[in-house]
Image (cartoon, helix red, strand yellow):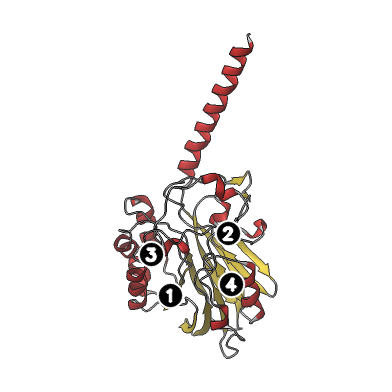
Amino acid sequence: MSLSRILGATVGGGVAAGAALGAYGFWEARQYGLRHEVLPILPAGAHDIRVLHLSDLHLVPTQRAKLEWVSALADLGPDLVIDTGDNLAHRDSVSPLLEAFGGLLDVPGVFVNGSNDYFEPSMRNPFRYLMADDGTRYVDGPQLPWREMTAAFRSAGWLDLNNAAGHLLVNGTRIAFTGVDDPHLEFDQLAAVDGPADATADLRIGVAHAPYVRVLDAFSASGNELLIAGHTHGGQVCLPGGRALTTNCDLPTEYARGLHRWNDSWLNVCAGLGTSPYTRFRIACRPEAVMLTLTAA
């Protein structure tokens, strides 16, 4: 066989392999799943609390399969909802988002915002996601209707934890929450929520969209037993077995998704349910929500 034919066959095989991988990634990004975790962290004698952790929907109104899947989560009967942001990816997403959340808005809940709740996404080089963070932040594009979204969440009784703290009574357990606005955009104001977590509460939870080390360390040092975050997409494009190549922040890749120890706290990072509308694929990293069952120690 001539060299030109060998090169042609090699190039053709590479193109076919790339197309097959792209098709698989497109399919995997729509295989929504629920990760279950059990954490014995409540005081003795406390009733179990089923916490539904939602993150990174990056919702576009035409994503009917995602909307239907999220809508069915209310049937699971969670006791508490924690939303760690990046719900929006389109200016017309708020109404379908609220419709999909449906009965979840009747459940006690807390939320923080992510960068993609604030600014409309734009076409970017997808390979930059896998590169080291150069500090570029896209804050000069059109704003999304995040005010409408947060107002609806507040009207439903959910606690707005963007640089704020609050309490909820869930199944007889008094939970103290501390939260920050998106650390990826450096909107977090740790000084506003600095100081020891409420020692009178039965459980203390720190909530952020992006799990930057400075935020996790501060939350843990303040006495929060549980830390909740999203943002990483679990790496989105992973090696076989789910090994992440990046977290899109300074969190080590081994913490990209799942339940882990972080200093003296537990950390749950949700891989989220979506992607940028311009890079709608996942490899070895299926989209997820998390049902975290808290039990007595």
- Rendered image quadrant of residue 197: bottom right
**Closer to the N terminus: mark 4 or mark 1?**
1
Residue 227 is marked as 4
Q: At label 1, which amino acid type do we have?
A: Gly
Residue 1 vertical position relative to residue 159 in the rendered view, above or below: above
Q: Which mark is residue 135?
A: 2
In the shown orientation, is residue 150 left or right of residue 275? Answer: left
Q: Position of residue 24 (x, y in %)?
A: 50, 38
Q: CA distance from mark 3 to mark 1?
A: 16 Å
Going from the N terminus, do you reach mark 4 or mark 2 first?
A: 2
Q: Amino acid at mark 4?
A: Leu
Q: Secondary structure at mark 3?
A: helix
> Height in image: 7 above or below 148?
above
Residue denoted by label 1: 109
Q: From the image, state whether disc 4 or disc 2 is nearer to you.
A: 2
Per the image, the residue denoted by label 3 is 75
Q: Decide: marks 2, 1 in contact (CB < 8 A)?
A: no
The answer to which of 287 and 248 lies nearer the viewer is 248
Most distant residue in the front direction: 140
Task: Pick whichever of labels 4 and 3 is earlier in the sequence.
Answer: 3
